[in-house]
Amino acid sequence: MAQLISIVNMKGGVGKSTSTMMLAETLAAQHQKRVLVIDFDPQTNVSLMLAGYERWLEAQENERTIDFYFEWEGSGWRPGTFPDFVLRDVSDVDKARTVDLVAAAPELRYTERDLIAALVTRGFFLDAIEKRIRERLLKVGIQTLRDRYDYILVDCPPGISMAAEASIMASDFVIVPTIPDVVSRMGLAAFTRRALANMQASVVSQQMAQRLLILASKVEEGNSLHEESLETLQQDARDGKWRCLETVIHQTRDIGFAAQRLEAEDGTRAFHRKYGVGAATASALADEILAITRTPERAL
């Protein structure tokens, strides 16, 4: 059964979607893992990074982006099931043929709100709405796919939505990409308390903080502020607030270029050609996640 990992941060622009893409493609290309990426972010960054604009547009025109799933729930009309939304083999890395995607669309920011409004009109209270979204999204949706994959990675939107909270509640682990500066660290403690509370609702463990993984991202070489903030994050990890990943994603041009999908005729490229000097970082991240999430020791 797939390990479910949510990638989330209250703040945007921290490298969340790029980290999701990097981890998915590395797990597939270097470790032959079956990976499903679910995009809950209306900015659709990871959808476009993986599938490209043409395939994403085709999915949207065919009503196979996740906002339509929420529309079905609001209307009570369901012409298909959650697996119908899966786009197969989306990566442009030639050895990452086992990366699939449930794509987002900008309309998602409105359809989730409209779903809540529709349920209120039908007499649902807030706690019942949250429960319904969790059950429909997880038991009827994501859970139907867990036997088909080794990893399910959920790219959550900045901030917290009901869908994101449902994903966190079901997660085995939560990765929080964080730029090590004062602004990005603001609110991290509050968010982690909420995330741990949500995870505690469904995952039994004596070491919940060890399932909350802080990933330092966009770190600038020689930036003393980043170095000092990174040390603070690592000290907080030693104090038991969370687990700080050893892998650090530095700000490099190659990783930035990797986020631009190849649209050549053959449609694929080698892993090291895509990630360049960032390939070693991608490999280290995947190795570390595999080590942390391996069974039967996944409970840490």
Image (spheres, rainbow, N blue to C red):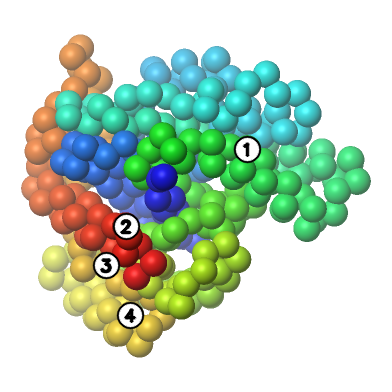
Which of the two labelled residues, at mark 2 and mark 4, occupies the earlier sequence position? 4
Kind of residue sitting beneath label 4? Ala
Category of crowding for the residue at label 1, using alpha-carbon neighbours closer than 10 angstroms: few (below 14), some (14–19), many (at least 20): some
Q: CA distance from mark 4 to mark 1?
A: 36 Å
Query: What kind of residue is marked 1?
Result: Val
**C-alpha gap between disc 3 and disc 4:** 9 Å
Q: Earlier in the sequence, mark 4 or mark 1?
A: 1
Callout in the foreground (2, 4): 2
User: Which dot, 4 or 1, sits closer to the camera?
Assistant: 1
> Label 2 to label 4, Cα distance in Å?
23 Å
Q: Is residue 8 visible?
A: no
Indicate the position of residue 33 as horizontal and vertical percent values: 27, 39
Structural crowding at the residue carrying mark 2, measured as other residues with C-alpha within 10 Å and reported as few (<14), some (14–19) or many (≥20): few
The residue that disc 1 covers is 140
Mark 1 or mark 2: whose residue is earlier in sequence: 1
Q: Quadrant of residue 269?
A: top left
- The residue that label 4 is drawn on is 237
Residue tagged 2: 295
Residue bearing the label numbered 3: 245
Quick one: quadrant of the N terminus? top left
Say whether residue 129 is visible: yes
* Depth check, front residue: 181 or 178: 178
